[in-house]
Amino acid sequence: MTKRFLILQDGSVFAGEAFGAPATTFGELVFHTAMTGYQEVITNPIYHNQMVMFTTPTIGAVGVNHMADEAIVPTIKGVIVREIADISTNRLQRMSLDSYLQRHNIPGLARIDTRQLARHLRQTGTQKASIVDVPDDHAFDQLRAMVLTTRQVAQVSTPKAYANPGRDANVVVIDFGLKNGILRQLGDYDANVTVLPYDATMEQITNLDPDGIVLSSGPGDPRQMNPDLIKMIRVFQAEVPLFGIGLGHQLFALANGATLEQLPVEHHGMNHPIREKITGHLLFANQGAGYVVDPASLTDTSLMVTHVDLMDQSIQGLRHRDYPAFSVQFFPDAAPGPYEATSIFMEFMELVNMRKEAR
């Protein structure tokens, strides 16, 4: 393998061996602690313009199969691992991870001390990073001059509406960086889904006469979104069942008067226990968050906390006291991750079908 380097904005240099595409790349660097599901992570639109370092020692052993894709085209900027597996005996494999990254012009680095890098990122937080051939002054100058876009949602959202047909309730999904896993879960209930762009108007949504609305997950800072979207959420949550996931959860919180805090170390993995407050039930689910709701900001709102992360007590779920509207910070679609959180989709669809039958 060719020797290449990972450089960080603070001047750190990590030498490794190249795999995937030979491209030079720039982006934010985060680390992911999940032990399974690397393909779902790599294809998740929330990692648009980011590089992901996996803490699991070996990545690639199950290859790549397109049934596990969370988006048609991955927009991740790089993959950092300790060891890359060259051989897979998985019967579903269609190509190796190395070949997949080459096909999509995504560089990778192996033979990185991922434990050391994870400790470093825990101390410094998310940093700009680059994969380069030579870690010279010119490479660092380019990295430090890089300006990260604030239009991630606009870059990953669908440009036009499309249908995921079913024969039951009529559900509208607003695409802020939609994971395929959300559509799979709604498909299990035979929902007739229409996916709309992130900038869909109130009139476009109303014309579809939805029985329920899903605010999808997505990348970026929710505080940068159009204020008209926040107003629109306030209107629809009073009219139809509404369910926010990830970025959608954060937008739901903002629409109801809460504020957000940026995490010093982002949550990416599925090893945090999450407690459902009303039952005390513990669950594990895939997480990917750079922002969390400030608990103090909920005091004068109509929101109540439904789920809490037991590692740092961060808010993982909210519900409106007066309307059939709720949200979760984690990903309940089990792609990847345990299936125990998928019951949240059942809860949403029960609300949707109650409204449908009452009309």
Image (cartoon, grey):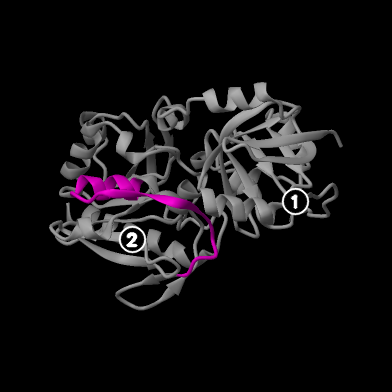
Q: Residue at x 65, y 60 (%)?
A: 35
In the image, 284: left or right of 116? left
64 or 254: nearer the viewer: 254
**Is 240 placed above or below 157 here?**
below
| Dot label at residue 132 | none
Q: Position of residue 328 (x, y in %)?
A: 36, 57
- Where residue 202 sits, quadrant-wise, is top left
Q: Quadrant of residue 66?
A: top right
Residue 6 vs residue 324: left or right?
Answer: right
Q: Amino acid at mark 1?
A: Arg
Q: Quadrant of the N terminus?
A: top right
Q: Is residue 169 visible?
A: no
Residue 299 location (% of width, % of height): 16, 61
CA distance separating discs 2 and 1: 34 Å
Note whether 316 is above or below 50 in the view shown.
Answer: below
Element under disc 2: strand
Within 10 Å of disc 2 (Cα), the crowding (few <14, some 14-19, many 20+) is many
Please name which of the two marks, 2 or 1, marks the residue nearer to the observer: 1
Residue placed furthest toward the bottom:
280
Tell me, yes or no, whether the highlighted magenta stretch contains residue 72: no
Instruction: Please tell me how crowded label 1 is: few (under 14), some (14-19), or many (20+) other residues with Cα within 10 Å.
Output: many
Mark 1 or mark 2, which is nearer the start of the sequence? 1
- Residue at the spot of label 2: 317
* Most foreground residue, 122 or 162: 122
Whether residue 12 is visible here, answered yes or no, is yes
The magenta stretch is 248-273
**Proximity of marks 2 and 1: CB atoms separated by less than 8 Å:** no
Which residue is drawn at the image coordinates 62% and 36% (left, top)? 11
> Mark number for residue 82?
1
Q: Amino acid at mark 2?
A: Gly
Give the left or right position of residue 70, taking residue 263 as reference.
right
